[in-house]
Amino acid sequence: MKKIFILLFIINQLIFAIEISSKKIENANTIFLKIVKKNIKEPKLTLDKHNINFFAFSKEKDSYYALIPISYYKELKKYKIIISYIENEKKVFKGIPIEVIDGNYKSEVINVDSSKVVLNEKDKQRVSKEYEEAMKIYETTTSKLYIKEKFIYPLETKITSDFGKKRVYNGTLKSYHSGTDYRASVGTKIKASNDGKVVIAKNRFYAGNSIVIDHGNGIYSGYYHLSKMYYKEGDLIKKGDILGLSGSTGRVTGPHLHFSFRIHGVQVDPLQAIRVLNNYF
């Protein structure tokens, strides 16, 4: 019996399980990675020089999870995720191969007022300042996880423009569509997709009246072009709370809701990220 107990103890100490949402991932998508290992410290991973910490996965004992955002501009090729942790005062490394593939995003032509495409110096300074302020927030990873259950969508209306479309403004390729657009006439109620803390609530040049929620662990959702905002920075939000009303503020051709997602500062497809997160939370 003693020998069996010792053997089971040794096997238990050696168990290392990995669960990954996908090893073949489209650009601008998100990977969920979970590891199960007893008695380890400081689990983290590296992908192409991008370091990401693991967080305790509260649903399971001795489990840790990490979200890996793949940039829209990530080179399409094979990579290796390097997992590291400290066990018995020694650093241990594990490798997981993945491949980034083309999301095959479409193009769309948009005609807007030229003042919104060719910016004057004052507008350039405003846009630059707003971008720097936002990125400082997005690149901050809050250790507290606010979410306790699955995400919902801010609207259930028709999607008028999918994430990832190449945006051709007045005949010139300027960017890609960094969120998902929902049909919404002015005054439509917009719901928070999950619990969190408001970290942006202001009018911005491109996004108009904007609310951004920090859900914790590097997860952020954004709600843009609002006509009214019902919350301010620092407010705590519950899933389903009415954040404000849809509108046509900022750079738009008409009223709608632009819904966005960032993970560890990287812009990702919000609907794909929600599907992945809802599989685990």
Image (tube, rainbow, N blue to C red):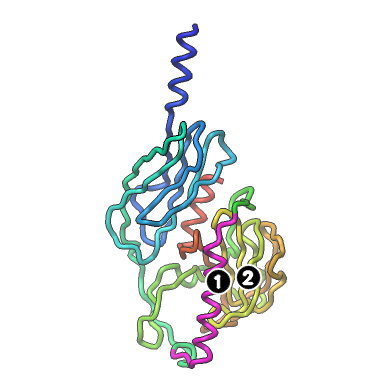
Q: Say which label, 2 or 1, has the lower sequence index.
A: 1
Quadrant location of residue 70?
A: bottom left
Amino acid type, mark 2:
Ile
Amino acid type, mark 1:
Ala
Image coordinates of residue 38 in percent, x first then y, are 50, 31
Local secondary structure at mark 2: strand
**Could you say which is closer to the camera, residue 198 or residue 209?**
198
Which mark is drawn over residue 200?
Answer: 2
**Could you say which is closer to the camera, residue 141 or residue 255?**
141
Residue at 49% over, 8% down = 2
Local secondary structure at mark 1: helix
Dot 1 corresponds to which residue? 134
Residue at 55% over, 57% down = 141
Task: Tell me where the magenta segment starts and ends, as one range.
Answer: 118-142
**Labels 2 & 1 near each other (Cβ < 8 A):** yes
As for residue 137 lying within the magenta part, the answer is yes
Picture layout, residue 253 above or below residue 84: below
**Could you say which is closer to the camera, residue 62 or residue 32?**
62
Q: Main secondary structure of the magenta part?
A: helix
Image coordinates of residue 22 in percent, x first then y, are 38, 48
Image coordinates of residue 271 in percent, x first then y, are 49, 59
